[in-house]
Amino acid sequence: MLAGGALVGAAALVVSPFDDDEARAALAGASPYFRHGVASGDPLANRVVLWTRVTPTPDATPGSGRGPAVTVEYQVATDTRFRQLVTRGTVRTDAAADHTVKVDAWGMQPGRWYYYRFLHRGVASPVGRTKTAPAYTSAPARLRMGVVSCANLQAGYFHAYRHLAARNDLDAILHLGDYLYEYAPGQYGMGQDDVDVRRHVPAREMVSLADYRQRHGQYKEDPDLQWLHSKYPFVVTWDDHESTNDAWRDGAENHQPGEGDWATRRSRAHRAYDEWMPVRLGSTAALGDGTRLFRSLRFGTLAELSMLDLRTYRDQQVAYPVVDPAVSDPARTITGREQLAWLKKAVASTAVQWKLVGNPVMIAPVTFAQLPTDLIDPVNDVTGLLPRDGAPYNVDQWDGYTDDRRELFTHIRDQGIRDTVFVTGDIHSGWAADLPYDVATYPLGRSAGVEFVASSVTSNNLKDILGAPPRTASLAVETVIRTANRHVRYLDFDSHGYSVLDVTPARAQMDWYTTGPRDQRNAGSTWAASFQTLAGTNKLSRAAGPVGGN
Amino acid sequence: MGHDHRSSGPSPFLDGDPEREQQRPAAQRRTFLKVAGAGGASLLFSAAAGAPAQAAPKSWNRAYVLVVDGCRPDEIDSGFMPNLRALRDGGFNFPRGRSMPILETIPNHVMMMTGVRPDRSGVPANSIFDRTIGEERTLDRPGDLVAPTLLWWARKHGLTAGTVLSKEYLYGIFGRQATFRWEPRPIVPISGHAPDAFTMDAALSIVEQFDPHLVFVNLGDVDRVGHTDLTGGLSLEVLRRTALVATDQQVKRFVDMLKATGRWEKSMLVVLADHSMDWSLPHKVISLTRPLEADPLLRGKVAIAQNGGADLLYWTGPASGREAGVRRMLQVAAAQPGVLSAHDRVRTPSLRLGPNAGDVIVYCQAGWRFSDPSVVSNPIPGNHGHPATGPIPFFLSGGHPAIRRGSSSEPAYTVDVTPTVAKFLGLPAMTGRTAWDGKSLLRW
């Protein structure tokens, strides 16, 4: 037993175990076996994935490959003292699993809060709180989720996680990717000068399995992230930085020949993700049984959340900035055929009202060249030069794979599908946009749905890259983009922060919150904007103000 | 407008149209009554034999089903329909409201008033190929509807029902089901419907004069502006906005009347559309006649009933060749540009369309339309019948305390209107072979 371990029942888990700073600090210190905290995720009506990592011996650090095989008990209860146990069991883990513990705990009731913890050699982990999804056929009045993406530890403190954790009105956290970054210290830090507010470990770009594990371990020791994980179940997907920058099916921008075989590197990244994240990869919580990440989670008849994987199956990005007509080549895909067919079926569901799509990269067309769609085909017949949806500005997004988008939007239109909401990360800026069938004739034409894009937790945005003060240089760019893209209703290139997505039968609303300086430990948070889409409209309108907050 | 709605004065029943009535058996002859409309013009109603001049005090509640024909759900929030929006926001909304196949006017009005799907009502589409006469025709005859209606059910239980249906074919198929029927007029040429201003005059009058427990109203302007303007393109949608504003004002008149006459507190309004609306450009037209005729197996053995966004195909060859014929029809139809999907009706039981819908159901993509027998047969850009036109506005409103405020993610279909209204009026549910397919949307 490690020194200082708290005995079962001896820990004072009585008052506000999640919201009291002293209690949290005491618990973290009192659980040396569980220094990476606890987490839950992928809530279903009767089961939730529970996660922790055990450190059975001091040398059994992440990625070390050291430490004995051990047994860890998990408990789920309806009370914080664990007197009303709902389910319990044991899990065996060892260095082959990097001592991570992941279990698909079941036997719970729909739509209820539960408390969980892990035990090793009589020592309890910090207590986590989680919530099951509503019953399949129930009609919930509301679903409210925190929305985050792009948390680069070197670029600053995770204020967004802390401010979300301080709320008590959420059902879950939606993490849209770039949960961690691959870079070495000195690369992609804060601002133009790449200042490392905190230094990555290991002190190199993560490439080996041990690197990925160690980096995951470092992020999981962040107190703000630990707090948020302990309070809410996460629903996650990966973007590129979980492996490396601008990843695609057979490579990545930040993967060099000297770094070995790409498939091997990606499988390491996926392996570490499977070990360290509270997610059903390959449809189960078991390790190593598959890497399929796209999946759906249902919240009664109110909503279904379809989480996409837009890195594993995509073709390579086209060259940029030269406009390449290949962006609209039907042979190129961002989703892969199987995932697109699955997504089309999911959004056509007649069982739920809101079709929420957890979307790692933006789907709203953002272009500068405007030409009516009806004219593009004839012009292409002659020249073959024009991308069918105009000149895109970011070919790493759906704009670089417009045939998939066209197929999806056409399907939405043909099937009379309403209330589709894409919730997106990746681009380190806040956006709200309609999704027009034809950008050139918008707003006279119709929209396939709306997109809400959350800003980054810490990763650099436009003002950081330009080195300009907030709301100066970016304003001009925002004006140009909004002028050329009338369907973009909100755009903030400057702020870091988080969002809150609130879904009721009447509307889906996104609130954007900005957080303070990234290099100040306890920076504040301010509400910035709120947009909504009223049920049945497929378009945005400005909302009066943010929801909840407590 | 006078507000003495329970006047004990002379009955407004008058004899009318004797020539037409003399052609009917005596027991079926209608009684005509003329009523002064709000605009001063006289309105012609017919009534069931022995109909009371006013509703019997069997039920205090009053239910009004207002169908804004062809309205899209987003149009309620478009800014052009503030009164409908206020009505919705003051009531209980079903954002998943949806029309049912075939997404046309007649079958969905029939589903509203029967609570059963077309395989049980006999009414799957506006237009079918009638095998008995060997022709395509509109399902507008009272005998086409084989399921009992809510209108009849209300009468059977001592309540009264009224219909104010702007379209001739709706008036036709519901025939003499209601206690009081407005005979739509004046009828706009081509569209075959009465303008909403006249329809609403009639709706106000039927309520004020006869106070039926249930009134079923179809407002046709929003739909018909799509069907009568042949220019296509975006200008059509601009014209439609004018219709949205005008129809919204007509709904306001109805609500104002209910409030001014003290009926609001006992009223439930079911407001919905029968289908949504799509628009096609002149070059996005599918005509299946030619490719079907070009096929050696199908030539001369297929009849088509065109329903705008859906074509119904009927095998007319020998029964022994039907299986092969259906397979070939599916292949030929699915290969045509603009076709979304083709379905073997018998092997797609979820469609629940019944044999009147033929053998193969073909849907077009959004932005397209069918035109048979030739590409110029259907010049109408406003189009429905295909899945793109499924979403409809659907909400309950009114001043009755049973009407909650809010919205629900539960599904709501046109077939749910009958059970909902029946429950509100205290009518028993039909059982056995006439049991409803729909469900009540009331939670009390």
Image (cartoon, coloured by chain):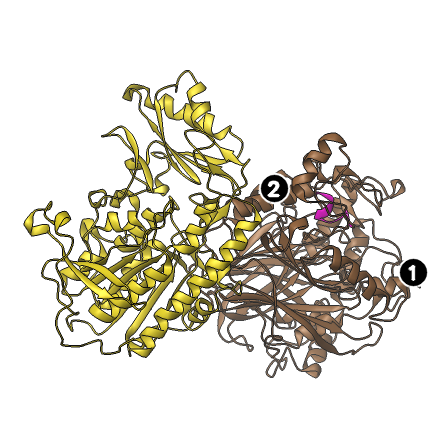
Chain colours: A brown, B yellow
Q: Is residue B249 visible?
A: yes
**Quarter of the image containing the N terminus of chain A?**
bottom right
Picture quarter containing residue B353? top left
**Quarter of the image containing the C terminus of chain A?**
bottom right
Q: Which residue is mark 2?
A: A407
| Nearer to me, B155 or A151 | B155
Q: Same chain for marks 1 and 2?
A: yes
Q: How many marks?
A: 2
Q: Is residue A1 visible?
A: no
| Nearer to me, B293 or A506 | B293
**Mark 1 closeness class: few <14, some 14–19, many ≥20 residues within 10 Å:** some
- The secondary element bearing badge 1 is classed as loop
**Mark 2 closeness class: few <14, some 14–19, many ≥20 residues within 10 Å:** some
Q: Which residue is mark 1?
A: A186
Q: Amino acid at mark 2?
A: Glu
Judged from this view, the residue extending furthest toward the top is B296
Q: Amino acid at mark 1?
A: Gly
The magenta stretch spans which residues? A394-401
Q: Are marks 1 and 2 in contact (CB under 8 Å)?
A: no
Does the magenta portion include B177? no
Q: Chain of mark 1?
A: A
- The secondary element bearing badge 2 is classed as helix
Q: Measured from the top left, where is residue B290 in percent x and y?
A: 45, 24
Give the residue displayed 85% in from the left and 73% down from the top.
Answer: A519
Give the residue displayed 46% in from the left and 25% down from the top.
Answer: B332
Give the residue displayed 13% in from the left and 54% down from the top.
Answer: B30
Q: Measured from the top left, where is residue A41 in percent x and y?
A: 60, 61
